[in-house]
């Protein structure tokens, strides 16, 4: 395996990870901003009020996006194992 192939393999892994995490992180960011705005407007500073909706949003986001994430991961794995001969050199 040459240095270029190793760098390309690592780059593909990072990009796949980035694109799989981006929707979940976006959901967490949007829900966090909305919860913070609601807490500012209502002057309610309870920690569980911010944590529980955020965790629920992550959970439902994962349930909604799991087929897409699984498909993306399976595609990456099939491409990786399909090109295994290239990496063994």
Image: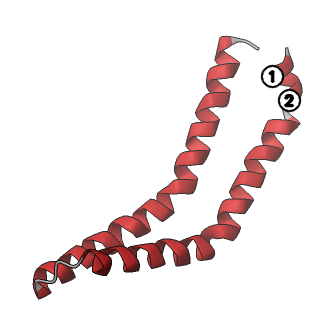
18 sits to left or right of 67: left
Quadrant occupied by the N terminus? top right
Task: Tell me if label 2 and label 1 are in contact, CB under 8 Å.
Answer: yes
SS at mark 1 in the image: helix
74 sits to left or right of 31: right
Q: Residues within 10 Å of mark 1 (few under 14, many from 20)?
A: few
- Any mark on residue 84, and which? 2
Residue at 35% of width from left, 73% of height from top?
51
Asked which quadrant contains residue 6, the reply is: top right
Residue at 72% of width from left, 12% of height from top?
2
* Residue linked to disc 1: 87
Residue 80, compared with residue 75, is above or below; it is above
Residue 45, compared with residue 81, is above or below; it is below
Q: CA distance from mark 2 to mark 1?
A: 5 Å
- Any mark on residue 35, and which? none
* Residue 83 spot, x, y in % from top left: 84, 32
Residue 71, compared with residue 47, is above or below; it is above
Residue at 52% of width from left, 47% of height from top?
18
* Residue 89 spot, x, y in % from top left: 85, 14
* Residue 72 spot, x, y in % from top left: 69, 56
Asked which quadrant contains residue 36, the reply is: bottom left
Outermost residue to the bottom: 42
Asked which quadrant contains residue 68, the reply is: bottom right
* Residue 13 spot, x, y in % from top left: 63, 38
30 sits to left or right of 69: left
């Amino acid at each position: 395996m040459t240095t270029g192939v190793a760098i390309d393999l690592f780059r593909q892994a990072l990009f796949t990870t980035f694109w799989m995490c981006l929707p979940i992180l976006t959901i967490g960011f949007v829900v966090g901003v909305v919860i913070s705005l609601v807490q500012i407007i209502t002057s309610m500073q309870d920690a569980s009020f911010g944590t529980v909706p955020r965790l629920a949003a992550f959970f439902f986001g994962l349930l909604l996006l799991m087929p897409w994430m699984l498909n993306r991961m399976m595609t990456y794995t099939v491409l990786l194992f399909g090109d295994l001969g290239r990496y063994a050199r």
